[in-house]
Amino acid sequence: DPAFGGADLSNCEREPIHLAASIQPHGALLALREPDLTILQASANAAAFLGVEAPLQGRRLTQVDARIARALAPLLADKLDEVPGAFRARLDGMVLDGMAHRPAGGGLIVELERAGPEENFAGRIEPAMQAILASYALRPLCDEVARIVRGLTGYDRVMVYRFDEDHHGEVFAEERDPSLEPYLGNRYPDSDIPQVARRLYIRNRVRVVADVHYAPSPLEPRLSPLTGRDLDMSLCVLRSTSPMHIQYLKNMGVGATLVASVMVGGRLWGLISCHHDSPRRAPFALRAVMELLAEAVGTRIAALESFVLAQSELSVRRLEQRMIEAISRDGDWRSALFDNPNTLLAPLNATGAALLFEGQTQTMGDVPSTAGLREIGQWLDEQPRRAGIGTVIGTASLGLEAPALAGLTPVACGVLAAPISSTPGEYIIWFRPEQVRTVTWGGDPTKPVEVGADPRDLSPRRSFAKWQEVVEGRAEPWTPKDLATARMVGDTVGDVVLQFRSVRMLIAE
Ligand code: BLA
């Protein structure tokens, strides 16, 4: 496996980014032994940063600076293993923000930064939280968040970056300086943010790159005397960022970043990503506000998701009612499904839908030909059904799963089907087109980009080309909520079909 900083495009998935062995030099790091707080490792810049005599290694923190040791002392009763503690120390002519935590492997890591200007965020947090918690849907929520965060942080671009089921990313909301090229709506492949980084971002919710042109300050000695290994810097705010990502940012013309994780139901839903064109620090108070806002956003998204599911449940109940009314009115339940596109298409974010029932087809939106629909029906019949009616069959890439049906993928690349009876060939089916056909790129789409292996070429334009490559033949993946909704519609229609058939039989007798 590559060492930190030694990864290339072929193996960056395995770069141990938490073993950076160096920091960004706008602060200083000390690794201490407890309980005597002897300094075991220090960043190369630490003595100069504190304005004290080098070397620091082997000395006790109290002897180096008693004020820092005193400010730190009250925290040491806490666990500090997953949540770092914060403190503030006033030295001569300098106020320091400190963070302390106990990394895996033992010892105590203390990070010191010059405190930011005395900013009082209190008056601005309240209305921001109100706005977040009052949003009634995902789109306005994310637009509002981008606005709020830009106003609060002053970074010149703020993006709400959202991951899909396949971990690919989309710039879902954006607020930017008007002079900047827009990224809103752009898509990027999962490989732009390796899994190791995503796992780290679940634990460490706010990251800062204060100046992409920084010269890393190495830890001295490099290996922890406690473990004989690299220090685990997972929770360090000063941790050096992977050179791969730094190259990406430089190529984008970005000078500094501040990024917060948005967690929904325990998974990394997305990021709030702030860019600035010149160096910019995000002091402790601002990072704390970002963490709080990101938490509120995640909580709100979780609530909106369950609200949306509840809404779907409600509209399916209403649909059942309307189908029953349609039977008594027209002697048929099908009209209730097709009288309004909001009934079938909107809840599943689908571009087409079809009903296959008693040898007939009825459709809405963009769908394959009747012959194509029959072929899909046959293919569905061949798919293993785990529990008969009540299970849905879904694919985001019909052409890859059923090469014989590849010709249908312009409109039916994503297929989600719910059986509506135990009779073969009877389904409600939803369709989505291939993603590359629906997403356009804000940059120059006529300029093709070769996706080569040279990290110096890393850029959003290249990433988009890579995304196009990896999602070729794939529709937007169906979400768990889509599957749940399809199942509900299938079950409900299935119930109505059963009733309809038994009533018809009674009448026929
Ligand atoms: C990290 N890459 C990231 C992060 C983002 C992106 C948002 C997280 C940074 C953070 O949380 O601080 C990607 N940033 C983007 C994209 C846009 C953006 C797509 O602004 C678009 C507007 N990166 C690559 C490739 C590799 C790679 C090909 O593009 C590897 C082969 C690596 N990206 C990489 C690594 C990290 C990263 C290693 C972790 C950086 C770290 O935390 O040290």
Image (cartoon, grey):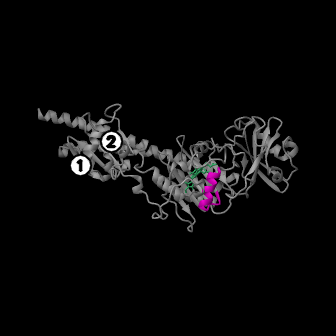
Q: Which residue is mark 1?
A: 370
Q: Nearer the viewer, residue 154 or 1?
A: 1
Percent position of residue 154, x then y: 63, 61
In this rendering, the answer to whether 313 lies above or below 116 is: above
In this rendering, the answer to whether 128 lies above or below 392 is: below
Q: Nearer the viewer, residue 295 or 399?
A: 399
Q: Earlier in the sequence, mark 1 or mark 2?
A: 1
How far apart marks 1 and 2 lie (CA) works out to 16 Å
Q: Nearer the viewer, residue 262 or 311?
A: 262
Query: Would residue 189 be seen by someone viewing this image from the given angle?
Result: yes
Mark 1 lies within 8 Å of ligand 1 (Cβ measured): no
Percent position of residue 211, x then y: 68, 58
Percent position of residue 282, x then y: 68, 55
Residue type at mark 1: give it: Thr
Residue type at mark 2: give it: Ala
Q: Is residue 252 magenta?
A: yes
Q: Which residue is mark 2?
A: 417
Magenta segment: 242-256
Residue at 70 percent of width and 51 percent of height = 284
